[in-house]
Every structure is written in C-alpha cells, then in structure tokens.
Amino acid sequence: HAAEETFSFQAEVAQLLDLMAHSLYSNKEIFLRELISNASDAIDRLRLERYSRPDLAAAEAEEPPRICVGFDKDAGTITIADNGIGMSRAEVIEYIGTIAKSGTGEFLKALTGDQRTDAALIGQFGVGYYSAFVVADRVVMTTRRAGLAADEAVRWSSDGKGEYTLETIERLEPGTTIVLHLREGEDDLLNSHRLRTIIRTYSDHISQPIIMASEGAEPGESAEDTVNQASALWTRPKAGLGEKDYHDYYRHISNDFADPLAYLHAKVEGRYEYTLLLYIPSSAPFDLWHQQPRHGVRLHVQRVFILEDTGRLMPRYLRFVRGIIDSADLPLNVSREILQGSLAVDHIRSSAVKKVLRLLKDMAANDPGKYAVFWKQFGSVLKEGISDDYGNREDIAELLRFTSTHSPTQEPDVSLHDYVDRMKEGQDEIYYLIAPTLAAATASPHLEAFREKGIEVLLLGEAVDNWVVTGLLQEFGGKRLRSVAQGASDFGDDAEKEAAEKAAEEYAALLGRLKAVLAGQAWDVRVSSRLTSSPACIVANEAVTDLNLAHRLRGSGLP
Ligand code: ADP
Ligand code: MG
C-alpha cells in the first residue's frame, strides 16, 4: 500500500472552506442535501456507465441503488454512504482536491453576505461537497471507482484547513462513504428524528431510496427503512401532486433556491410516448450567457437518467428551461451524437417548445406581473428565437415586450398587439427606433415629430433587437415595421407637406450649399417636418441598412 500523502488545497478552495466553516452556519443542515445529491448523481452515473460498458456490467452484479445515512452518538459522527460510481485516486484529486472547476471562483464572487442566500448558492455553483465543513471539523471519505480492484480504493481526509491527505486502501464494494466528524456543539444533529426531518425537507424527491436505521429498533436489531418518497415525481399521476411537490422537485433538480415561475407536466401518448416536466425559473442563473451553461433539461429513458443537456433537447433561445424529459422511445445507451439525428428527439423537442411557448402565453395573459418578471430575466434570450426558430416566429413575436414612447416608465411592457391596437387613424406601420442603448433611443431627435403627433414608437436598445426586427421579416400581423431613422417621413398631413415643400423652395440655396459640402458623404439634404426642436439629424437611406445596424455590423467585423 502506498503511504499517506499530503496535498494542499488551491487558494480558492481554502478560502471557500474557511467560509463554509465560519459564515454559513445559520443554514447548516444543507450539508446533508448536498452530500445526498452527490450520492444520487453517483448512482445515476454508475447505472448509465453500465449501459455503455458491457465489461463493467459483466464484472459486477447490479446492486439495487441505495443511499444510507447513519450516525454514531459516541463517536460524534454522521455517515453518508452510496453504492454509486465512486472515484479513482486521480478523480478525487481532480474533483475534490485541487479544483479546476469554474464554479468556485464564480461562487466567491456571487456571495452576498446574507447567510440564507449564500447557503442556497452552494448547490448552484457546484461546490456542494465542501458544505460538509459547515458542520464537521474533519471529513474522511473512502471511495472505490466501479471497475477498479478492491485494493485501488482511496481514503481522503481533511480538517478543511488548507491540506488534505490521500491514502490507497482496500474497500470491498464500489461506491463512496463519507464520515463527518462533527464540530463541538453539533450534537443536536446526532438524532434520528432530526436527520429524518432534514432528509424529508430537502431530499424527499431523490429518486433512489435514502435509508436509515429504524427508529426505536432494539439494540442489535438491524431494521432499516426508507426515509424519502424515492419515486420519480413525473411518473406519479398529476392528480396526486400539489404545487409544493412540483416546487420542491424543481429546487432539487435545478439547485435553485427560489420557486419556479411556472411549470408544466404532460404525459404524451401516440406515435411517441414521453413525459415532460418543464419549469420556468424565476431568476437567471449566473451562467445564462456562458457558451456552455451547466444546467438544462434532463433526459431520462424509461426513468433512467441519461444526460443533462443544453441546446439539443431545447433550442438555445429556451436554454433557461429546466426539467425532465422522459422518453420511452430512445435506447438506454443513447449518446449526445445519437440525440442529434433522432426523429423521436426532434418530435419531442418540437412539442416541448410549443408547450413552453403556450405556457408563457398563458402567463402573459393571466398574470402580467409574473410575466414581467419572466421578461426581465429571460426576455433577451427569448428574443433570439425570432431569428432562430422560423416555425414558431409568430408565437414568439406575441411574447415580445418593448419599451415605447407610450410607456410611462422605462419598463418593457408593450406588446406588438398593444401597439397595433393603439395605432393612430391612418397609421399603417409599426414605428421603432434602434439605438445602442435604451437611453440613447429615448433621447434621439428622430422621435421629436412622432412625440409631437402622439405616434407611438418602440424603443429598442439591445444588440439582439437588430435581429428581432430583421427576423420579424419586417412585419407583424400584416403591419410593416419601419425604423423612424429611415427614409422620408411621410406621416404628416397635407398642410405639413405643403409647408415642407415651401420651406424647401425657400432654403434651396442653403440645401444646395450643404449638398456640395457633404458631397460623397450624404445622399441628400432635405427639409424635413420630422424635427421640432433639433436643427438637423442624420437619416438612413430607405434602401440601405439602418444606420445603427450598419454601425454594429461594422463593429462586429461583419461586412
Ligand atoms: P457538483 O456535485 O455540483 O459537481 P460537488 O462539490 O457537490 O459539486 O461535487 C464535486 C464532484 O465530486 C462531483 O461532481 C463528483 O464528480 C464528485 N463527487 C462528490 N461526491 C461523490 C460521490 N458520493 N460519489 C462519486 N463522486 C462524487
Ligand atoms: Mg453536488
């Protein structure tokens, strides 16, 4: 056997551990949720690996999954054991010790100083393992990777103060056991009733059984029972489930600490058979704009967890959707590559998208306050759908919300329907103004005449807005979209047009002079009725790209 070896934690990890030990105390029971969640993941991963590695399936018989929680009053320890995939020595170093995980740094940056909020962030940032040090001053983990020999197991041990030790040991079964040596004064946790309550509160919906020694069992008797529900929530009949069940389950799969804004649960039968349990979160995760967000929709095949995916099961513009898709029509050894070309996946995805859009539409209609929250968090993501999802473009267009010159506040609360309903007599176009920011749009001289006449203009100030107006194919509900920064403004009445013509004659000499000076830089110089207080403004030619778009395209290096 190799002797014990000592390693140092990376600086960030050491900082994190210090924080765990000193600042998250008021929510100390989350350690159990995090360690059980890791045990559950490990069991899922083992099951999955058995499908793709026949050698593993042949070498080791399949044990029924179990997560055991126990405690020892005399020793002052709590033990969490699972028969999941376990870790090799290298994996322990990578996942537990040295941390190359991006989550740690992000977590430290996201801390608010509020214990409740910060404790809830732990799961979200993938630093759950360390929460053991909230209650323990020494953690000993033994683990054996499935597929490795009994004498290739590892013991990891640390007091959370900057160093940990590793030792190669023997372990009879694959899996992981974590022993927490509780800090002084944590004796209240050494109590069956207390632990059961924590498990039911935070881990009821873990689909594997969480087992504890039975309460009141005679000494020496080895009675045990399952503490949690241990069934996949989405397979249970809707009639037996309440909002609380759905919300608890959401928190479990999403690592979010807030309730979701909305959810849908649908069992679909027909050509393809599948169940959807999809959630709209109430706030955006920290990595919403990362290339590869950590979380997405979890794919199960006949209840077996297969993979978590962002981008294939749901289109990118719905990447904030969380939940479960459980299909009966995919092979258990399905891979990401197979997902790409699967007709069943295409079908499920398109029906899931329609259902999510429908859910959002209902939310917008029945609970505008809630929808405003949604829009604030995810509106800019949803906008991508206008150009990315041609087939659902119209449904997405109805979900868009804008700030407009009619908004009393700067809140984006105007839908295209609202706009069309308010259009002036004789107005047959939807006017918008795009600028690099909302503030710039609001201050633009292009708006002067529109304001004067009480004609509403949508104010667009996000980069994605260019693709929205282009993607709408310049049209919504039969109404053309028109940039107020483009072309002649011909919405004036006859008297105004006449006045403008007269002015043009009067100032012909000046216009000629200006045209000569600006030759090669301006197409034309005109007298306009579109301004009321500014002396002049630059207008894009009708036929060419909107100036703001041109500006952005140049900036982005596109032609
Ligand atoms: P996360 O679970 O979000 O990845 P954690 O800090 O909770 O972050 O766990 C870090 C990693 O350690 C896990 O991703 C997993 O690879 C490994 N791990 C933790 N607990 C176990 C376990 N019981 N069995 C196998 N691997 C584990
Ligand atoms: Mg975890």
Image (spheres, rainbow, N blue to C red):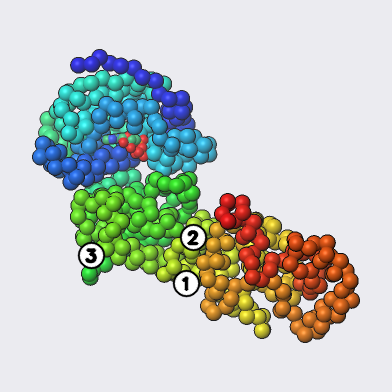
Which amino acid, mark 3? Glu
Q: Tell me the amino acid under the disc marked 2.
A: Glu
Mark 3 vs 2: CB contact within 8 A:
no
Structural distance between the alpha carbons of marks 1 and 2: 13 Å
Q: Earlier in the sequence, mark 3 or mark 1?
A: 3
Residue 419: x and y, percent?
Answer: 60, 74
Q: Is residue 36 left or right of residue 293?
A: left
The tag earlier along the polypeptide, 3 or 2, is 3
- Per the image, the residue denoted by label 3 is 273
Q: Name the front one of labels 3 and 1.
A: 1
- Mark yes or no: residue 238 visible: no
> Is the residue marked 1 within 8 Å of ligand 1, measured from its CB?
no
- Which residue has dot 2 on it? 384
Residue 403 appears left or right of 81? right
Quadrant containing the C terminus in the rendered view: bottom right
Where is residue 225? Give x, y as percent.
18, 42
Which tag, 1 or 2, sits closer to the chain's start?
Answer: 2
Give me the residue at 43% from left, 65% from top: 389
Spatial separation of the CA atoms under disc 3 and disc 2: 29 Å
Please determine whether, in this image, residue 505 is positioned above or below residue 255. below
Q: Residue at x 42, y 40 (%)?
A: 125
Q: Which residue is mark 1?
A: 394
Q: Nearer the viewer, mark 3 or mark 2?
A: 2
Q: Is mark 2 within 8 Å of ligand 1?
A: no
- Circle 2 packing at 10 Å, graded few (<14), some (14-19), many (20+), is some
Judge from the rendering whether residue 493 lies leftward or rightward of residue 461; answer left or right.
right
Q: Nearer the viewer, residue 130 or 52?
A: 52
* SS state under label 2: helix
